[in-house]
Image: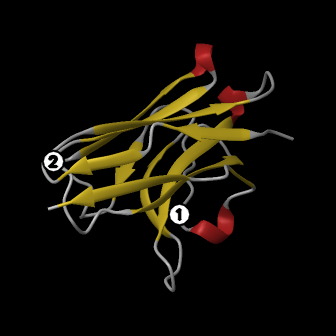
Amino acid sequence: QVQLVESGGGSVQAGDSLRLSCTASGRTFSRYAMGWFRQVPGKEREIVATISRSGITYYTDSAKGRFTISRDNAKNTVYLQMNSLKPEDPAVYFCAAKILSAYGAISYFGEADYWGQGTQVTVSS
């Protein structure tokens, strides 16, 4: 089992940047495909970006060109660098983990095995 702890959320202006971090407990972080999701009240949790064990990344259209997901297995941490934040980006951002093959990716929220507690991102225009 793994525990995930997110950090880095906050309140920023449109156009600003934030870097979210998600640190996992345990020694098996490299076995997990990781993902970042976000959720606003009344809506389903939606995927933002994912990264496989081998480093293959995926982004939703809204994240492409602005967000970058990366992982540091030595630090048991996955990051989400968010640039050019927009008024439509505010949400609670969650990281997720699932044991998959080297090239496997989490494709929707129902697949994740573990979740962090979430970190709030607020963007004002």
Locate residue 90, reporting x and y percent. 34, 63
Mark 1: few/some/many CA within 10 Å (<14, 14-19, 20+):
some
Number of the label disc, if any, that sits on residue 107: 1
Locate residue 79, reporting x and y percent. 45, 34
Depth-wise, is mark 2 or mark 1 nearer the camera?
2
Q: In the rendered structure, which amino acid carries the disc numbered 2?
A: Ser
Quadrant of the rendered structure where residue 121 is?
Answer: bottom left
Task: Please report the residue visible at 50 percent of the width from the left and 79 percent of the height from the top.
Answer: 41
Task: Please report the residue visible at 60 percent of the width from the left and 37 percent of the height from the top.
Answer: 102
Q: In the rendered structure, which amino acid carries the disc numbered 1?
A: Ser
Locate residue 64, reporting x and y percent. 22, 53
Question: Considering only order in the chain, which callout, 1 or 2, is on the residue closer to the N terminus?
Answer: 2
**Which residue is denoted by mark 2 in the rendering?**
84
Tell me the distance, in whole angstroms, between the alpha carbons under discs 2 and 1: 25 Å
Query: Secondary structure beneath disc 2?
Result: loop
Q: Quadrant of the C terminus?
A: bottom left
Task: Please report the residue visible at 66 percent of the width from the left and 71 percent of the height from the top.
Answer: 110
Query: Secondary structure beneath disc 1?
Result: loop
Locate residue 122, reporting x and y percent. 34, 57
Q: Quadrant of the N terminus?
A: top right
Mark 2: few/some/many CA within 10 Å (<14, 14-19, 20+):
some
Outermost residue on the top side: it is: 74
Vertical side of 122 occupied by 102: above or below: above
